[in-house]
Amino acid sequence: MQTPNIDWTRLHDEALDIFQRYLQVDTSNPPGNEVRACDFLGDILEQEGVPHERFDAGEGRVSLRAVLPGDGSKRPMMLLNHTDVVPVEREYWEVEPFGGVIKDGCIWGRGALDMKGLGVAQLMTFLTLKRLGVPLKRDVVFLAIADEEAGGNYGILWMDEHHPDKLDAEYVLNEGGGGTTELFGVERPVFNVAVTEKGPLWLRLVAEGRPGHGSMPHDDNCLDRLVRAMHRIQQWERPLTVSPVLEEYFARLKRAGIFTAEPTPESLAKAAEENIMIRALLSNTISSTTAKAGIKHNVIPARAEATLDCRLLPGVKPEDFVRELEAVIDDPQVTVERVFEGWSETNAFDTELFGVIEDVVHEHIEDAVVVPGVTVGFTDSRVFRNRDVIAYGFSGGVNAPELMATFHGHNERVTLESFRLNCEMVFEVVHRMAT
């Protein structure tokens, strides 16, 4: 299979211009306003003569879908990206967060990493295949989806309920994976291809009790009750689980000299004590995120509540976890409410797509290590995996850990070189899979 003759310098310049302008489109969620992104992307597609569909979930929560038709000999491949971004705290940014500023060899802006950069790389792949008139064996679908950052009720979940036929695919490329320049203190490029992810379980703990004057303490203080419950949760030691995917993940890193310990449950348990990423990969995690109680300094409150962000390992059912949590709290007057939940099946990694990704990565970066991995956050890929579709998190960019730390943080940015590499690798993977 011969790669088309592409003027990458010209294409990179065009991609960078689109990327800068896309970052200037504020789609902070809440409220989302993803219709703005669809207007932006739709204008580009129209200029290229590509028809597209819009799907309106209401209140500006719009998603966009376009298709390059293949000959039907293979099932579709989807380029999935979300158009919303998390909010910013402008006072902590060095540049305008919606300016698409180029500075210090990087392009800065909310969404640079999550995930407008990958969205543009997918868009350029889509447009390049169209411009070159590449004969396709399968449809290539570009789906720009709303509301990923808030769980997908106005995006992928809404599409799954109202337009399930529009999600048909054999393979999906989405966020959740990518390259890093360093892992576990070893400087060597590692590309994580996410084949599964942890499931979100957002909980609210509520305690109610007898209000009263602060000068008259009693045993039915709801805030005391909630504090005791939170303390018990913090003391709860949950077991570590090494799934087959993570066995392969650590085994490959061991062979590459990146993970120096033996990839055994005992060694991993020891490593998890010192490394929060390993701990997150191997266990059900709980983060306390908000707490609220009281109306006045000298008034015992009638209600206290706190929220927990739990992330469950693939295969763990939310209802089972909640039952365990309630047993740990051991107080019937503290109720546990399930606010939001999701889960993901696990994809195989002995697939045609995984093999193509490995080949492309090694052709661009010979000494890179490619591993199957688990995304500790959640993505829209879960909906496809639960439909028995191969949905991988893959980005062709390579980012240093200090830049990855800006993901959902202040001064989010990506290097220009990483963005260029992302565009080239995504195109090459899709071109090989579609032809």
Image (tube, rainbow, N blue to C red):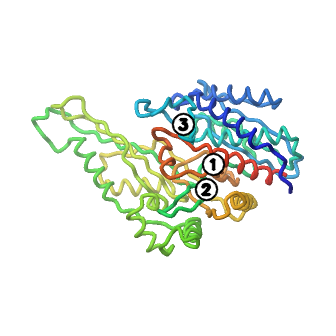
Quadrant containing the N terminus is: bottom right
39 left or right, relative to 404: right
Q: Position of residue 137 (x, y in %)?
A: 86, 50
Asked which secondary structure carries label 1, the reply is: helix
120 over 398 or under it: above or below: above
Q: Position of residue 34 (x, y in %)?
A: 61, 29
Asked which secondary structure carries label 3, the reply is: strand
**Residue positioned 35% across, 40% down in the render:** 290
Give, as a three-letter code, the residue at label 2. Ala
Question: Where is mark 3, residue-wise?
Answer: 103
Q: Spatial distance from mark 1 to mark 2, Cα to Cα?
A: 10 Å
Question: Where is mark 1, residue-wise?
Answer: 381
Q: Nearer the viewer, residue 230 or 9?
A: 9
Q: Spatial distance from mark 1 to mark 3, Cα to Cα?
A: 32 Å
Question: Where is mark 2, residue-wise?
Answer: 194
Q: Which numbered disc, 1 or 3, marks the residue closer to the eye?
A: 3
Q: Which mark is residue 331?
A: none
43 over 293 or under it: above or below: above
Question: Decide: marks 1, 2 in contact (CB < 8 A)?
Answer: yes
Say which label, 2 or 3, has the lower sequence index.
3
Q: Which numbered disc, 1 or 2, marks the residue closer to the eye?
A: 2
Q: Which numbered disc, 2 or 3, marks the residue closer to the eye?
A: 3
* Label 1 neighbour load within 10 Å: few <14, some 14-19, many 20+: many
Q: Nearer the viewer, residue 124 or 108?
A: 108
